[in-house]
Amino acid sequence: MGEYDTGGIVNDLREHKMMTKMMIKMMTKMMTKTMTKTIPKMIAQVLSLVGLV
């Protein structure tokens, strides 16, 4: 670790931040896609359950 210059560490951290941002963006996109598909189903299930009770 002692041989590792701080500039390299800073660069790694920056890249890591970018990667994390990209990952979060991708995840949110995927989540929104699945949500728009599953939410109507879930609502229908809840309504049918409420209707049964």
Image (cartoon, rainbow, N blue to C red):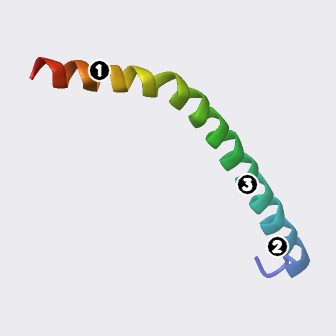
Residue plotted at (82% across, 73% down): 9
Q: Residue under circle 2?
A: 9
Q: Is residue 25 above or below residue 39?
A: below
Using the image, determine if residue 19 lies above or below residue 6: above
Inter-mark Cα distance, 3 to 1:
34 Å
Disc number at residue 45? 1
- Distance between mark 3 and mark 2 Cα atoms: 18 Å
Q: Residue at x 76, y 60 (%)?
A: 16
Name which quarter of the figure residue 31 lies in: top right
* Left or right, 34 with reference to 18: left
Name the element at disc 3: helix
- The CA span between labels 1 and 2 is 51 Å
N-terminal label among 3 and 2 = 2
Looking at the rendered structure, the kind of residue marked 2 is Ile
> Could you say which is closer to the camera, residue 52 or residue 16?
52
Of the residues shown, which amino acid type is indicated by label 1?
Gln
Image quadrant containing the C terminus: top left
* Residue sitting at x 66%, y 49%: 24
Check disc 3 and report the residue beneath it.
21
**Where is residue 52 drawn, in percent x and y?**
12, 17
- Residue at point 73%, 54% (across, down): 21
The answer to whether residue 19 is left or right of residue 35 is: right
- Residue in front for this viewpoint, 51 or 38: 51
Residue 46 appears left or right of 8: left
* SS type, badge 2: helix
- Residue 15, given in percent of the width and then of the height, sits at 83, 60
Q: Nearer the viewer, residue 38 or 14?
A: 38
Up-down relation of residue 6 to residue 36 (above or below): below
In the displayed structure image, the side of residue 10 where residue 49 appears, left or right = left
Point out residue 42 in the picture as x, y percentages from the top left corner: 36, 25
Crowd class of label 1 (few under 14; some 14 to 19; many from 20; radius 10 Å): few
